[in-house]
Amino acid sequence: MNYTHRCLHSHKLPLLILLIAIVVILIQPYSIHAAANSSNTTIRCLTSQSSALLQLKSSFHDASSLSSWQPDTDCCRWEGVTCRMASGHVVVLDLSDGYLQSNGLHPALFNLTLLTNLALSGNDFMGAQLPDSGFERLSKLVSLDLSATNFAGQIPIGIGNLSSMLALDLSNNPNLYLSEPSFQTFIANLSNLRELYLDEMDLSSSGSTWSSDLAASAPQIQILSFMSCGLSGFIDPSFSRLRSLTMINLRLNVISGMVPEFFANLSFLTILELSGNAFEGQFPTKIFQLKRLQFIDLYWNDKLCVQLPEFLPGSRLEVLDLILTNRSNAIPASVVNLKYLKHLGLTTVEASMNSDILLIRELHWLEVLRLYGGSGQGKLVSFSWIGSLKHLTYLELGNYNFSGLMPSSIINLTNLTSLTLYNCSMSGPIPSWIGNLIQLNNLNFRNNNLNGTIPKSIFALPALQSLYLDSNQLSGHLEDIPIPSSSSVYDIDLSNNWLHGPIPKSFFCLPNLEYLNLESNHLTGIVELRPFWRLRSLYFLGFSNNKLSVIDGEDSPSQYLPKIQHLGLACCNLTKLPRILRHLYDILELDLSSNKIGGVIPGWIWEIWKDTLGSLDLSNNAFTSLENSPSLVTFTHLSHLNLSFNRLQGEIPIPAISLPYGVVVLDYSNNGFSSILRTFEGRSLRVLNLRGNKFNGMLPKGIKEGCKLETIDLNSNQIEGRLPRTLSNCKSLELLDVSNNHILDLFPLWLGNLPKLRVLVLRSNQLYGTIKGLHNSDLTRDHFSSLQILDLANNTLSGQLPPKWFEKLKSMMANVDDGQVLEHQTNFSQGFIYRDIITITYKGFDMTFNRMLTTFKAIDFSNNSFVGVIPGTIGSLVSLHGLNMSHNNFTGAIPQQLGNLAQLESLDLSWNQLSGVIPHELTFLTSLAWLNLSNNNLTGRIPQSNQFLSFSNSSFEGNLGLCGRPLSKDCDSSGSITPNTEASSEDSSLWQDKVGVILLFVFAGLGFVVGFVLTIIFQLVCQLPPAKMSPRVAQREYEPLLLVLLLLQTLIASSIPCLPDQAAALLQLKRSFSATTASATAFRSWPAGTDCCRWEGIRCDDGGGRVTSLDLGGRHLQSGGLDTAVFSLTSLRYLNLGGNDFNGSQLPATGFEMLTELTHLNISPPSFTGQIPAGIGSLTNLVSLDLSSRIYVVNQGDDGATVMSNLLPSWGFSRVNFENLIANLGNLRELYLGLVYMSNGGEGWCNALANSTPKIQVLSLPLCQISGPICQSLFSLRSLSVVDLQGNDLSGAIPEFFADLSSLSVLQLSRNKLDGLFPPRIFHNRKLTVIDIGYNYEIYGNLPNFPPNSSLIKLHVSGTKFSGYIPSSISNLTGLKELGLSANDFPTELPSSIGMLKSLSLFEVSGLGLVGSMPAWITNLTSLTELQFSHCDLSGSLPSSIGNLKNLRRLSLFKSNFSGNIPLQIFNLTQLHSLHLPLNNFVGTVELTSFWRLPYLSHLDLSNNKLSVVDGLVNDSAVSSPKVTFLRLASCNILKFPNALRHQDKIDFLDLSNNQIHGAIPPWAWETWKNLFFLDLSNNKFTSLGHDTLLPLDTRYINLSYNMFEGPIPIPEESTASQLDYSNNRFSAMPFDLIPYLAGALSLKVSMNNVSGEVPSTFCTVKSLRILDLSQNILNGSIPSCLMENSSTLKILNLRGNQLRGELPHNIKEDCAFEALDFSYNRFEGQLPTSLVACKNLVVLDVGNNQIGGSFPCWMHLLPKLQVLVLKSNKFYGQLGPTLAKDEDSCELQDLRILDLASNNFSGILPGGWFIKLKSMMSVSSNETLVMKDGDTYGAFYHKPYIFTTRVTYKGLDLTFTKILKTLVLIDVSNNRFHGSIPETIATLSMLSSLNMSHNAITGPIPNQLASLHQLESLDLSSNKLSGEIPKKLASLDFLSTLNLSDNMLEGRIPESPHFLTLPNSSFIRNAGLCGPPLSNECSNKSTSNVMPHLSEEKSADVMLFLFVGLGFGVGFAIAIVVRKPCIGKYT
């Protein structure tokens, strides 16, 4: 402040007088002598003196200001020079404020040996060092002023030897320091010093002795100014000897201890400046009584207690500043005695605020007033009186709650020169009357909610010098500054607003501009840097994070450039480094992040700025290498270096730092650095982030004491070995993340000694052993006392958890809300903040926390091998938010103490062996939003509470003994499961009420049995004699004769050769096939000139010589297409071309119609593509038609369901009009169309069959995409014997008429969407041999009692809701060969009678909740060839008796909880073809080659166990190995690529995902597996493909995601129907020839890479593409319009997080197929295209964080499936919903579940009628359902659903949801300009889990109706103008874990309830009228009572209610019994 500055420097006046007197005394003898000798003579300056001065002048770059310094003139007359008159020696040299520039101080200066005064201040010596020698020659020097000269380095000792020195000023040279010599040595000889100014010099090396050194060496010191010198320690008592002190300036140091009492004895003291230190204790009150004291500044000593005394009249105090001190009393009334007080700065105390303000109002003579709200910020304060202080020139008010407009009385303060109102909750526009304060030179409205445009009157203020309007919501265009050339403005900060449009050119013409910050707005246009270089004073220029395109604009920079110190050009579309940078030598901070700069980081960066650079951010670019490593350069000031998210490789460049500074933040994350880490050294290194690189080897061990590291992030590298024990030297360490490496170590218990460690993430390593308990010596010490996050998931830790250990986690026991974010702040000029980021599993999701609050606490021990009980001491960690102990082997009961964890939001104890009941205490956890107790051994009734009823059944499934809601199992009165699970009634009264109906069914069943038996007897008795038989039957007597006649006919016909035209056609057909071994074999009997009727595969008619049968099936022939010669064989009746390869060609469009005699046509599996020719449909004689693909069944996925696909080849027919195909095929008996997709939906296919094919017997339509119910007309097809409709989309009930189809033998309906009761009569169809209804999840029923003579051979009810007991009569099915019982509702025990089914060859069990070990009778089933147990709760190891099942060909034990080692007896199963053991708990090391002992093994799956798979003994020969085709080894701890696979050349399915394989893929892999159609190498550490970009594969699926691949993305040679996933790598480009190879691709995912350039428009030509994900790259340019406008197949387009710009394409066509569009985090502008309404299937639309504008898109009501709409952080405006009430129906978004409109310009009143249209937010959805899960079976082979992510503000955090569940229902309208009241209709949205309306201008009360939102977890209404009381019913929202009502005008008592008491006070602050806990404001008796009713009162009301309900029930029950008795009698 100017006033303070004047006070400090006014004390140089006495010194100046003193110095003049001394000079006069020194000069006087010479003057007298001269007068005596020559009264008229003056001696010119000596030649030596003028020569020295001229040499000094020559050292300056521009000495025009020294124009009088000319040779041959008297230097004593030169400007700034004074000589001794008698001798001509220069004695005074004053060049201060000459704006001279030089590269150093010329040594000629030291020839002026008689200098007494030297002043060089205010010149620029450009960072040069002061000369080491020379100053000692100036022994006469009494005054030396080198302030603000930009010298650097060590201060020479010669200055310290000038013993005559009286005044020394070295201030304002921040690069000067004292190290050698030390401060003590330097000052030792300066005993005559009176004034010492060392401001901003580094004296930190002086330690705490600086004060005693001063006292010892400078006893006469009067003025001491040591501002910002890095001083520390206490003020030594010897300092009291300095009794002459008049000024003490020690501000901005780190001096601690108490302010000395002896300061009160310094009677000359006038100025005491102690602000910005760490003083503590009580400030001596006596100091206030010093009579000469004029200035006291104690600002910013927050631990210093100050008690103001009674001020006596006559006090000279002019300045009193106590802001941010701990003032303990009110302002005394005697403050009015301070008549000289001009400057007052106070932090107001809430308790005395009213009285303080009354007194301040009386100080009408004040000129400077600074008031800070402190902890009383929430209280609404009126400053309407402020206008009465008419003398104010400086007004600063901070941290108050104006809750609206600024005080209008300020307009009366016409003398104001500075006005600061920061963080005062001001809203609305800036008032125009500000322009009337014409004296203003400083205007500061930072950090408020001001909106609207910036008034023109502000820039018209004639005296304005500095303008700070940053961090508001100002919008509109920037206006031109009137007459900029005459403007005095030097500081402008408009950052963090919503300004848009171009930057006015007048900003380039402000001659005095020093500071311009326009960052984080929406400014547009091209900006040339050239005009700014004309602004000579400019040192700060910030354009980052706008929509600007910055260019150099100058080839040859001006000679005089400004001294730019801060340059912010982040996100400015730079493609290369600006050339001008090479000429800016003063750069302190440079931000070029998030641009498109590629190539090499030039070496000149490190050389030019080595002495100045403090912060450099080059992150998120495309740099590939460093020309010179910064490790070769010694930096002086570097504190922040960020090179993250580039493509840098090689050795890590650790900068060398010279003393005394050091790097504070070093971020090299997400590059390709690969060298072994050598050191963590660095004197000041606080943050080291190396995550996502390729670092390998071991961590450095030699970490020395004094390590200052606070964050170490080494996540996702390849680090091995142990954690270095010397990490314990890093006493400041707060975060250690070494997850996803190969660290092999015990749990680092020794880290517990680090006192500040908050976050420890060790997940996904190889930690082993136990967490040992503490030694007795440790029990008394702190141990992990600050830990708040501990993640040990996915290791191999074991043993029991020590209970005592958890008692040491003190931080997790404290409920403290400090509202802090885990971050690190440098002390650099812009206060750079580095925030730690971690990813943990929370609420079942992998969540990335971008802002990690210090209050968040979580423990994750999942996926280890811990045993024993869960320690009850965990219940003492009361501030825990997340606890995950799943997938271990914990036993015993769930501790009741967990009910103490009141803050717990997520609890996962699944997949253990916990037993007993669920503690009722868990229902007390009102914040619990996620609970998983599944797959344990829990029993009893699930506790009933509103909270528990909200959890889905998946939270409890897999616990056989649990019952009660939400499970379907009922409990009896004792809390056990009701024995009769078939009874589904909810109470016994309803059961009694249905007795009569049940009797009716009993007798109907009895009649059925009697009728059935009588019919059988009647048929046996009434057999007809042979004479009465039909002729057809009687004909059998003549069958021998007919056979003889037929034989004779054949012999005669065989003598006639085939006709020549027939042979020619066959030979032409032969020539169309390629010459291969297969063709040579097939056609070896087809030589020309022989009888074609004798050729293999040919049959001719009886005597005509015409070919009637052509059978080439299964010959493996190859051809480019079917030769039309085949159509010359017009007598063909049988044609079989299946099992050959026609290379995807089309069938001839014409020709088939010529084969009119054809009865059998077989092209299965088809290798053709295109449409089925119409001619096939005209073959009226067809009896059998087979166009099907073969089905390949693969057991995949966590749900155990099978996935079907076409195996070989991969061609199929396009969509077929089924009705047209079969319209004329009336004779058809057999129809096979598997995997031929139908175009007829609904019942079309079904009715077409019934109408056109009455004789059909075999109907096989699997995977044909037919839908709708099975129509009743199908019953007319009475000849049906086989019905195969599996794998379609059929819905509805299974018709009962299948029971009446007497010929039906096969009923295959699996994998549809059928539902309802399975008709039990179907089981009684005696002809049925196959019943397969599996995986129709909504079908229910019971298995019947099976009679002894059943024909069933195959029975599958897996994946249904079949229930009841499995009947023991199942043993009657003696012919049963296949049995599938995978239904969750069957009981937990299998009947042993199954063991009697000796013919059983296939047995599948899934989901039955079996307990114990595998049933022993399994080994009795010796005929078994296939055995499957999946999703069972079996335990223990796999029995060795499994080796007795010698005939087993397939063994599948999927997710059945087996543990222990894999038994060796499994290798006795020598017939085994398929072995699947995934998702169990098998342990041990397994040699892969040991499985090669199974000679027929083709399928092997060991995934997701706790195995470590190694190669074993690898045989160089492939002779003895089986031919494996299917291999899954995911999550098998594989460390290197298995060499055992080298000779497995038949593999076509390979999954090595989720291992730790690093390095390159071996080249032999690509050569060996050219037929690989499935490859998953994701989640490894691969760095190289080991092959060029074009991969030699014909594949269907490639997943290389989550590795470290680099270079161009690879492409397979063939990619028809393929899915390609290259996400989360370091790929940098798309090959120019990529698109042709993607011709048949279905999905391409390249997210999270470094791909640059534009989006290729050639993507539009890939018509097969369904998914295109290019998100999180550095793509630029615009979206190719054809990608959206001409795409009829693309369903998912994700371009999130790039640098795309322009407008979205507008002409989207009607055939749009989009389901999800994500354009967020780009730079798009314009408006949303209304043609999006053509995308009727759109579910997700995210355009957040762009520059898109326009009004709310009501037209989206035409998108019927839209569920997620994110428009946040754009430029939308206007009101929400329709403009007119009559248009409400045209703005309904009924299916919407997530609406994010935050940070736009929406305004107006929130329309209540609009919210009630959000119907989907009122309905319940399953927890398991995703909002957007694409379910199309793209290329039916293998399909993973594409799961969308979104980033929203939730519970006050920016969270990324990796899965969007339908239960996440969210509305965010924050940071807009809505006003009016909160609509009560929002309360109808009963499924809302988050509501954010903060930072608006909403008024009125909080609606009581919000209390009905029972699912609400997060409610933020902060920063509005809400009034009234908080509705007490809000306290009943059990799930509400985050509540923010701060910054409103609420009043009254905060509702008291156990739940509300857990909320922090930050939820309620800055509401002036609120009182009660958790606020410190106590309520008066008059405050409105707002206490929730006592729970006992509610319970008594409930009891009374239930009593009356029970009375009514009893009366109703008695009447029902009386009425029903007669009815029952009638029935009986």
Image (cartoon, rainbow, N blue to C red):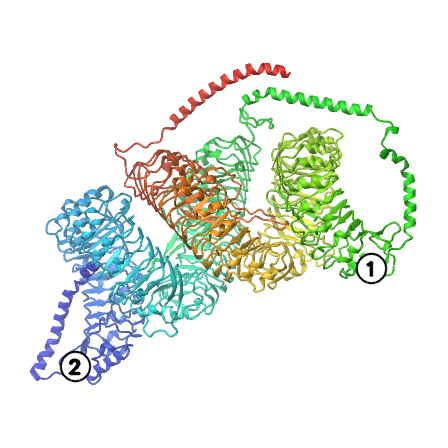
Question: How many C-alpha atoms fall within 10 Å of the one at disc 2: few (<14), some, or many (≥20)?
Answer: many
**Quadrant of the image occupied by residue 1416:** top right
Nearer to me, 224 or 1799: 1799
Residue 1064 numbered tag: 1
Report if residue 1598 is visible in the image.
Answer: no
Label 1 environment density (alpha carbons within 10 Å; few <14, some 14–19, many ≥20):
some
SS at circle 2: loop
Q: Name the residue under label 2.
A: 88
Work out whether 490 lies above or below 1255.
below
Amino acid type of the residue tagged 1 in the rendering: Ala
Of the two numbered discs 2 and 1 in the rendering, the one whose residue sits closer to the viewer: 1
**Total numbered labels:** 2
Q: Quick one: quadrant of the C terminus?
A: top right
Q: Which residue lies furthest to the bottom in this view?
A: 72
Quadrant location, the N terminus: bottom left
Write the residue at 84% across / 57% down.
1085
